[in-house]
Amino acid sequence: MGVSSTGRRRPARGGHGVALSLAAVAVLVAAGVAGLVLSSGGTGAPSPKGVAAGSPTTGVTTTTAGPTTSTTSRAQAAAQLLSAVSVTPARGASEVGAGTVVKVRASTGRLGSVDVRSSTGASVSGSLGTSGAVWVSSSHLVPATRYTVSYQVEGTGGVTASGSSSFSTAPPPKAVTATVWPAPGLIVGVGEPIVFTFSRPVLTYVGQSSVVSHLHIAMSKPVPGGWHWFSPVELHFRPSQYWPVGEQVAVSGDLAGWHIATGEWGSGAVSTQFAVGAKHVSIVNLDTHEMNVYDNGQLVYTWPISAGAPRWPTTAGTHIVLDREAVVRMDSATVGIPVNSPGGYDELVYWDVHIADAGEYVHAAPWDLSIQGQQNVSHGCINISPARAETFLHFSRVGDIVQVVGPGRPPRVTDHGLMDWSFGPSVVKWVPAQVSQLSTPVSTTSPTTLPPPPSGAPFYPTTIPPAPTTTATVPSSSTSAPPPTSTSVATTAATTSAGAPTTVTSVATTATNVATTATNVATTATNHPTTLVTAATTTRPTTAGAATPPPARPTTTASAAGSSVPTTAPATGTASAPVPVVTQSRRSAGT
């Protein structure tokens, strides 16, 4: 008998050996097929009809980092990895809440990377757990936005697979929009702030502090500036000192993605552009009864004036021109004084430059010409002669500076004519702002020509005489303002606007054909009563302040005013900005 050197016989080929090999192959194929039909087993939001929760998209791409036996086995392994991935919210889901947390979970293998991105390209931040099995978002979603979730999962043997899913968020329950001032194309004075007015009160610190990241200010000559919330619906920007002459400014903002509070999100966009004109600074001295008018630092006029009497003093501080009107109907009944009572009146007053919400104007006062320059007898306004008043109206533009010095009443932080430049950092804290270089020049509107005076109306020459040969510079106290503080905390409305009633202001469109929409201001956190103010046609929309105007002009001068004030509005000359002729009733301090 023949025996091999190992003592074992070599098995015969074929027969039972072939059957065993075929059985092993069958087992392997069965296992591969079973892997292809494994369910994800994940949990998540309900899926759209006919779509499994967390199902990956079709058309999967696969890669391998190591040797594999065949293309078929590589695809099978990748499909098995993807079938074990679940995504929340489910693929195709809509009306997803903005507070929903996005989760990607791999029950087999390990997540290599996860990217959640909006249709605008904004990324959603998140983190991957230490095991690599779960990724969880950490930032809010934006309402009314489509999101795509892209992920890569890694398996054994170097097999990787990529998949994606998408969903859409619901619109916000409460959307907050904004408008911005100055209107596009205006040429403004050196003190004009940029004012953002919001459709709903912004009452949270997060909302107030984060909105500035959605607003952008570009300048042709970048200068430092700051932000301040004067009320929950009004945010201002101003330079740390007066705007440079000739400055060009472009403002833009996209409020989408601005999270204010639970259920409240920003919506819409804002934009405007404007330029800064000559530096007009006028100084009213209540002690000397004089008004000095400066044009780019050069003294061009010294005029006698009569300001507020001791009983009704003019507000001291740095005013800005709010608007200009050829005529204002001043009705004492609008400030609580019956027209037919002592001190009552109902008259048309001409050539009015508005400098305070409290109803203070620089205007024509022919009834007290004999005491202008000698005594203060008005009820808060700055009275000058008709010829000078007409000249000053055409000289002025929105944002010009009128500084009142002397023993006047203190300014109120709720008054738009005074709030921006009359207070130090202990009252108004300006949070430093980021600005950028303007790349494209802005376009501005041309000055408009006023209609000729009506027949029978008095006419006063408006030609500005040549400047004197000697010059004087504006005192330094009137050319600068406290720079923004270094604090990084947004000031809430309670700091500066206590006692301010909520208002609804209706503003008509000016002759520049720039549509100014009405601003509806909701009740603020202080729950003050709402006051409805109907403003005459103006150049700048404002919200009336809380200051109570002084009483009307005394009866001793009312008869003189009544006999000398015409009933039709004269208008002539060329203005640096539109000057409407109106005869509407207006809340005013009188004359």
Image: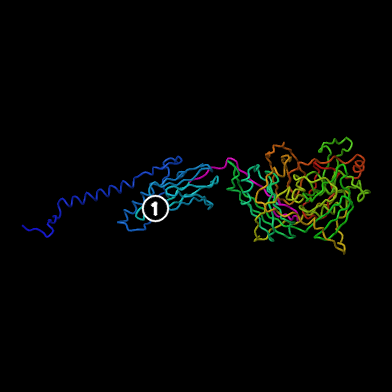
Give neighbour class at mark 1: few <14, some 14-19, many 20+ (Cα, 10 Å).
Answer: many
Work out which residue is located at the far bottom of the displayed protein and give it: 469
Amino acid at the residue labelled 1: Glu
How has the structure been colored for display?
rainbow
In terms of image quadrants, where is residue 172? Answer: top right
- Is 172 included in the stretch rendered in magenta? yes
**Relative to 339, 14 lies left or right:** left
In terms of image quadrants, where is residue 466? Answer: bottom right
Residue 199: % across, % down: 65, 43
Work out which residue is located at the far right of the displayed protein and give it: 370
Q: Judging from the image, what secondary structure is the residue with disc 1 in?
A: strand
In terms of image quadrants, where is residue 278? Answer: bottom right
Closer-to-camera residue (471/442): 471
Image quarter hosting the C terminus: top right
Image quarter hosting the N terminus: bottom left
Residue 527: % across, % down: 69, 37
- Is 75 included in the stretch rendered in magenta? no
Residue 345 vs 579, above or below: the answer is: above
Which range of residues does the magenta coloring cover? 167-193
Residue 203: % across, % down: 64, 42
According to the picture, the residue beneath numbered tag 1 turns out to be 154
Closer-to-camera residue (178/409): 409
Which residue shows up at 75% across the image and 40% down it?
533
